[in-house]
């Protein structure tokens, strides 16, 4: 990893450690429980979480640094994309965008992206999603459904040790994604879909949609939703919303 990239990612690499958990009984006796362990920051001692003793601690650096090493060996251009990246004590999301690996929906270039997740509180495991970022407005997209089908069929799962091959395979699937988008561009918004959007995503998003020009197709509605998620939803919650939208629209 070069110095510039390491500096940009330094906030992700704070040291973490496991510590014993102590508690006081009713008679103020202090005991240690072997069934749980505390996850703390080793630099400032701050408590992050208390986890079951079976929890496996995997520091962010152990998944990000190998990923960066593979990226540096790739021919394709890539950037660390801040638009959907964040890090907190208990979890993180890192977005890497490939600006040259794009497709176009007739209005804008849409660049392939990957989203790497990790947590120290059990909220999610190590996960990597493939998606995209829309050039003109930074709308984040996750292609969980269409690519999920592909990876389940053709590989043993998304791994961090075969990134070059994953990029190639995912890029090869862009025609499938484009075909699905073409379908969405030619399907109207049904009442059933409107009801599903409200049920899955909430009334605040529905209110925003109602303030926009009536969507003439499901693709327009999809872009309304991805814009709202990318600009109005807290960073920590975006992945969950993006996956729900992916499922709703079959992307």
Image: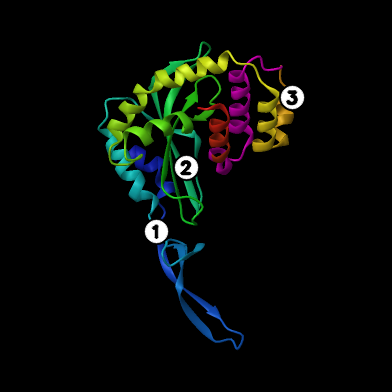
Q: Which residues are magenta?
A: 214-239
Pointers 3 and 1 in contact (CB under 8 A)?
no
Magenta: main secondary structure: helix
**91 within the magenta span:** no
**Is the residue marked by circle 1 packed among few (<14), some (14-19), or many (20+) residues within 10 Å?**
some
In the displayed structure, 44 sits above or below 26; it is above
- Mark in the foreground, 3 or 1: 3
CA separation in Å, label 1 and label 2? 17 Å
Q: Position of residue 135 (x, y in %)?
A: 50, 20
Provide the residue designation for mark 3.
210
**Residue ID for mark 1:** 57
Residue at x-position 56% and y-position 18%: 184
Assess whether residue 231 is covered by the magenta stretch. Answer: yes
In which image quadrant can residue 111 be found?
Answer: top left
Give the number of the disc on residue 239.
none
**Frontmost residue, 181 versus 223:** 181
- Residue 46, image x and y in percent? 50, 63
């Amino acid at each position: 990893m070069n110095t510039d990239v390491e500096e940009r990612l330094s906030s992700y690499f704070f040291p973490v450690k496991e510590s014993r958990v102590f508690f006081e009984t009713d008679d103020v006796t202090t005991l240690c429980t072997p069934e749980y362990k505390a996850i703390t920051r080793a630099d400032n001692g701050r408590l992050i979480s208390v986890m079951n003793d079976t929890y496996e601690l995997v520091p962010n650096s152990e998944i990000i640094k190998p990923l960066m090493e593979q990226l540096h060996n790739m021919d394709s251009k890539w950037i660390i994309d801040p638009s959907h990246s964040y890090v907190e004590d208990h979890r993180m999301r890192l977005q890497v965008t490939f600006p040259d690996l794009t497709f176009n929906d007739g209005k804008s270039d849409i660049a392939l992206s990957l989203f790497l997740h990790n947590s120290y509180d059990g909220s999610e495991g190590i996960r990597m999603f493939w998606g995209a970022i829309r050039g003109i407005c930074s709308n984040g997209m996750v292609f969980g459904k269409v690519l999920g089908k592909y990876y389940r069929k053709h590989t043993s799962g998304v791994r961090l040790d075969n990134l070059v091959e994953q990029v190639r395979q995912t890029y090869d699937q862009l025609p499938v994604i484009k075909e699905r988008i073409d379908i969405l561009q030619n399907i109207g918004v049904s009442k059933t879909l409107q009801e599903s959007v409200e049920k899955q995503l909430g009334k605040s998003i529905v209110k925003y949609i109602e303030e926009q020009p009536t969507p003439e197709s499901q693709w327009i509605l999809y872009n309304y939703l991805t814009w709202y998620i990318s600009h109005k939803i807290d960073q920590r919650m975006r992945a969950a919303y993006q996956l729900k939208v992916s499922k709703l629209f079959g992307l």
